[in-house]
Image (tube, rainbow, N blue to C red):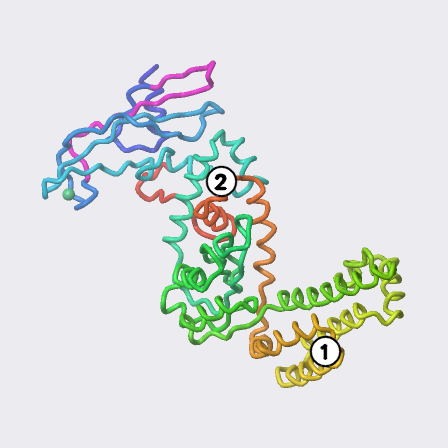
Amino acid sequence: MEDILNRHYAALLGLGEEWKVTDVKLDVAARRIDIWLEYAKRSAICPACGRLMPLHDQQPERTWRHLDTMQFETLIHAKTPRVKCADDKVKVIELPWAEKGSRFTLLFEAFAIRVLQAARSVKDARDLLRLSWFQTHEIMSAAVKRGLARRDAEEISFVGMDEKSFLKGKDSEAFACLMTDIDRHRVLDVARGRSEKGATALIEKALNPLQQYMVCGVAMDMSAPFENAVRKLMPCADVVFDKYHIEAHLNEGVDNTRKGENKRLLEADDKRLAKSKYLWLTGFEHMSDEAIAHRNDLLKCALDTGKAWALKELFGWFWKSRDKFMAKANFTFWYEQVVKSGLKHMVKVANTLKNHLYGLLAWFDSRINNALTEGFNTTIQALKATAKGYRNFENFRTVILFYCGKLDMRPDFVRVGATL
Ligand SMILES: [Zn+2]
């Protein structure tokens, strides 16, 4: 009977005849199965030269977690043989069931990756798999490494660069910068900081030198460090300032105008602008009829905030221009209106846009933006909320690439044998 069980497990594990199952222990109370394997031959393939070499010795016994058997946690125990190569150096042989250094079998890792991808959160996946945070992260980290090593160096025409807050605070190191492949909807890489050094590291990590030359356009916020890094490393790329960031700058101009004006009005006990912040920032589609009516009433009062809002709305026509020549005319008209208004916060934004006009006009050639990165924000926020461990930058990078990198992360089963 015992022999049948052993042979059954040997077959289940898909092992060749060089590995024998020597013992199987079933602990019903602990819902656990332990399987002992032993190397049965006197020689093995040397991982360095690929030749069959005599065994030298064995490493102490190690344990790997395997796929559960009928909901019983299943552990494999074995001593790994070492061979002596022709150069007299001793080498640890490759195991058919696990990657070097891993505490899990390949099948378990493959299963864990699928569960992590399908579960609603990393926490849910961990509970299902009965893994610690650290173990889960080990599996994700190995998966991302495999995925990055397999990624092809294909042509990537349009990328987005954006910053993400990753720790509390405002200094560069509290941020991460992220590059997306706009056409293939994936995150290419993540680097620490939002300085030129960080942006340079990001470009070098995400793309090889030839790929850097092939990029035609980069969507980004009006950020000098990002722009400088792109000009140096991606000489053929147009810098395209992201539409949504520009909208945010205009909103900020309106909001600063409202803050200043509200303060002045409140001093005269005039509460017209109190609690009106979102009336000026949201688009019509998100507003209630009451809110729109309220705003229309305020617009009749000829307040600075209303004028600033109207200028922000007027800028919308810029994006509707037929081509970049019309867009330039549109911009010039808009800029003059802002200057005439004398609203200092709006003039400040208008000057920023004027100084970056080339990157606004470049949008008409490629029409790229960072909406994709904004979309990944939801995922990234959810990941940050679930684990304190993501305060470590490398862990943060791993988890983003695991979920947003579209990587082929499956373990390599080629050497495991036909039965798997
Ligand atoms: Zn060798």
What x and y, as percent, mark residue 72? 46, 23
- Cα distance, mark 2 to mark 1? 47 Å
Identify the secondary structure beneath mark 1: helix
375 left or right of 270 in image = left
What x and y, as percent, mark residue 183? 53, 64
Q: Which mark is residue 338?
A: 1
154 left or right of 336 in image = left
189 left or right of 295 in image = left
Disc 2 residue: CB within 8 Å of ligand 1? no
Which of the 4 quarters of the picture holds residue 207?
A: bottom left
In-front residue for pair 305/13 = 305
Q: Residues within 10 Å of mark 2 (few under 14, many from 20)?
A: some
Name above or below for residue 169 compared with residue 236: above
Q: Amino acid at mark 2?
A: Gly
Residue sitting at 63 percent across and 85 percent down?
A: 325
Q: Residues within 10 Å of mark 1 (few under 14, many from 20)?
A: many
Which residue is at the far front? 267
What residue does disc 2 label?
389
* Quadrant containing the C terminus in the rendered view: top left
Q: Amino acid at mark 1?
A: Val
- Magenta stretch: residue 37 in it? yes
Residue sitting at 54 percent across and 39 percent down?
A: 122
In-front residue for pair 200/408 = 200
* Quadrant containing the N terminus in the rendered view: top left
CB within 8 Å, label 2 to label 1: no
What x and y, as percent, mark residue 53? 14, 38
Identify the secondary structure beneath mark 2: helix
Q: Which residues are magenta?
A: 24-45
Name above or below for residue 26 compared with residue 363: above
* Camera-nearest label, 2 or 1: 1
Q: Main secondary structure of the magenta part?
A: strand
